[in-house]
Image (cartoon, grey):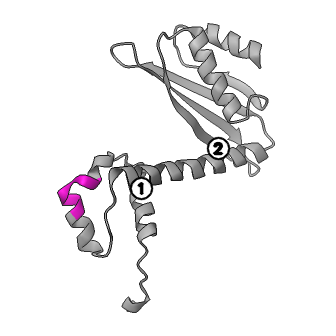
């Protein structure tokens, strides 16, 4: 039988777990304002003080920063070259574009590792210069401009031209 007295309430740990749940299941931040969610949460732990959206957003960004640092360290210490893939898409009005940049590498235990480096808003116009600036900024930010072995891009009309610009700058 479990010892009930051994339980230790930790507000910060519960906040972190709430942020992780929102990230993991891609819940909107507004979930913490839903009366049903609040009632459910307090029925489990009446001591938990529900936080506001801005607080949970800060918690999520803190988790992101921590995970980014871990990924950057892992990539930096890795001795293998890195393959990069990009995927670009636009919303229906063609004015709002997004690019996801992912790294792929073999770790010291010969396991394939993949990390989403950035999910980036790409401003209009969607020209080869804009795409190359966005991708180059990501490569420099993650300090992998010299570790890259290959880059694979999706079937977007300006990809070949913007890759030529990237190769000229690396």
Mark 2 lies on residue: 113
At 69% from the left and 11% from the top, the residue drawn is 165
Label 1, secondary structure: give it: helix
Outermost residue on the right side: it is 79
Instruction: Give the quarter of the image for residue 79.
Output: top right
Q: Where residue 36 sits: x, y (%)?
A: 18, 59
Q: Where residue 159 sits: x, y (%)?
A: 58, 12
Q: Where residue 167 sits: x, y (%)?
A: 74, 15
The answer to whether 33 appears left or right of 114 in the picture is left
At 27% from the left and 75% from the top, the residue drawn is 46
Residue 36: in magenta span: yes
The magenta-colored residue range is 32-38
Can you tell which of label 2 and label 1 is closer to the viewer?
A: 1
Q: Quadrant of the N terminus?
A: bottom left
Residue 26: in magenta span: no
- Can you say whether 159 is above or below 38 in the image? above
Q: Residues within 10 Å of mark 2 (few under 14, many from 20)?
A: few
Q: N-terminal of the two: label 2 or label 1?
A: 1
Instruction: Give the quarter of the image for residue 168.
Output: top right
For residue 157, say whether it is visible: yes
Mark 1 lies on residue: 19
């Amino acid at each position: 039988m479990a010892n009930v007295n051994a339980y230790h309430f930790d507000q910060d740990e519960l906040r972190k777990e709430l942020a992780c749940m929102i990230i993991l299941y891609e819940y909107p931040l507004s979930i913490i304002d839903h009366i049903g969610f609040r009632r459910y949460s307090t029925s489990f732990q009446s001591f938990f003080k529900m936080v506001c959206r801005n607080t949970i957003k800060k918690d999520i960004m803190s988790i992101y920063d921590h995970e980014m640092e871990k990924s950057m360290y892992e990539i930096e210490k890795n001795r293998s070259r890195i393959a990069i893939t990009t995927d670009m898409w636009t919303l229906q009005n063609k004015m709002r574009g997004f690019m996801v940049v992912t790294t792929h590498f073999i770790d010291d235990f010969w396991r394939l590792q993949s990390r989403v480096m950035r999910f980036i808003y790409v401003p209009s116009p969607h020209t080869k210069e804009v795409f190359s600036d966005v991708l180059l900024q990501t490569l420099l930010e993650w300090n992998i401009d010299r570790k890259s072995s290959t880059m694979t891009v999706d079937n977007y009309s300006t990809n070949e031209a913007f890759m030529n610009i990237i190769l000229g700058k690396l």
